[in-house]
Amino acid sequence: MHLKLSGEEGFTPPGVKDFDLPPIFENIEWLTKPVLLVALSVVLISIFFIAASRKALVVPGKLQFSGELVYDFVRNGLAKDILGPEFMRFVPYLFTLFTFVLVNNVFSIVPLLQFSAMSHVGFPYALAIITYLVYHFVGMKKQGVGHYLKGIAFMPGVPKAIYVLLTPIEIATFFIVRPFTLGLRLFANMFAGHLLLLVFILGGEHLLAGVIGLKLVSPFAFAMGILLTFFEFMVQCLQAYIFTLLTALYIAGSLADEH
């Protein structure tokens, strides 16, 4: 992040350039902060849930209770309620997806880290592609490739003349729109939220370095940044939930006999 404070150039508002982070080491171009944060999230999630489940007790302690709370939320609140009798075999994927997205989202408001890998479009789309492959594979395995694709292209109970219009829409929805919007929704929310925080925090810093009149206004900018941080935390949790919820709904649709 670069903030220009000179009298000639004034305040340069944050933009897309602030998300284009340089490599940590010059000779390793792929090792950027987002990549490092993704690796860190995997380590932290693994350590937390291994520690929470290593000495499971009938009356759980605080750590075990926290781990079970998150697991039960995904197992019962998402998988069981949406997927029905076959839900257990999808719990590991949904649970991993939810915790991974949530931790990486929350990183953007953690001091010193203050960045979410999900604000780089490649990471949400990678997750969306995995979900895309999972729910299509599940549908083809259960119904057979031909029956599954026929159910998508030719919705039962529709007049044949309508297929001319409906079939291209359904094919585009299942194979293009769903994975595109699934990744885009997560990316757009994380990108916009982080950009908004930058505007108020860096703007407050710029005002603080200005003349006395501007110094008096700067606390309001910082206060707004703090309020937005709490709001952003709610958005981060909600987006992790929505991403996992939509994944569960897509899988449930693939398991159904009719689309």
Image (cartoon, helix red, strand yellow):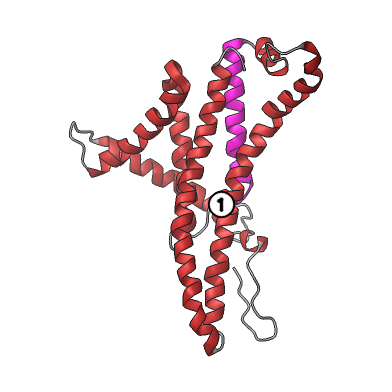
Q: Which residue is mark 1?
A: 190
Residue 79 sits above or below residue 107 on the image? above
The spot of residue 135 in percent (x, y) is 58, 24
Rendered residue at 47%/24% (across/down) = 82
Q: Nearer the viewer, residue 140 or 40?
A: 140
Residue 32 can be seen, yes or no: no
Residue 229 sits above or below residue 211 on the image? above
Q: Nearer the viewer, residue 128 or 184?
A: 184
Q: Is residue 124 magenta?
A: yes
Q: Main secondary structure of the magenta part?
A: helix
**Left or right of residue 192, residue 234 in this image:** left
Quadrant of the drawing holding the C terminus: top right
Residue closest to the far left = 59
Instruction: Give the magenta range.
Output: 120-143
Residue 232 can be seen, yes or no: yes
Dot 1 amino acid type: Met
Q: Quadrant of residue 154?
A: top right
Number of marks drawn: 1
Dot 1 alpha-carbon crowd within 10 angstroms: few under 14, some 14 to 19, many 20 or more: many
The spot of residue 120 in percent (x, y) is 61, 51
Q: Nearer the viewer, residue 96 or 39?
A: 96
**Left or right of residue 106, residue 132 in this image:** right
Rendered residue at 40%/31% (across/down) = 77
Residue 28 sits above or below residue 93 on the image? below
Rendered residue at 48%/67% (across/down) = 224
Q: Secondary structure at mark 1?
A: helix
Rendered residue at 61%/59% (across/down) = 23
Q: Quadrant of residue 175?
A: top right
The spot of residue 30 in percent (x, y) is 62, 52
Q: Is residue 37 magenta?
A: no
Quadrant of the drawing holding the N terminus: bottom right
The spot of residue 101 in percent (x, y) is 49, 43
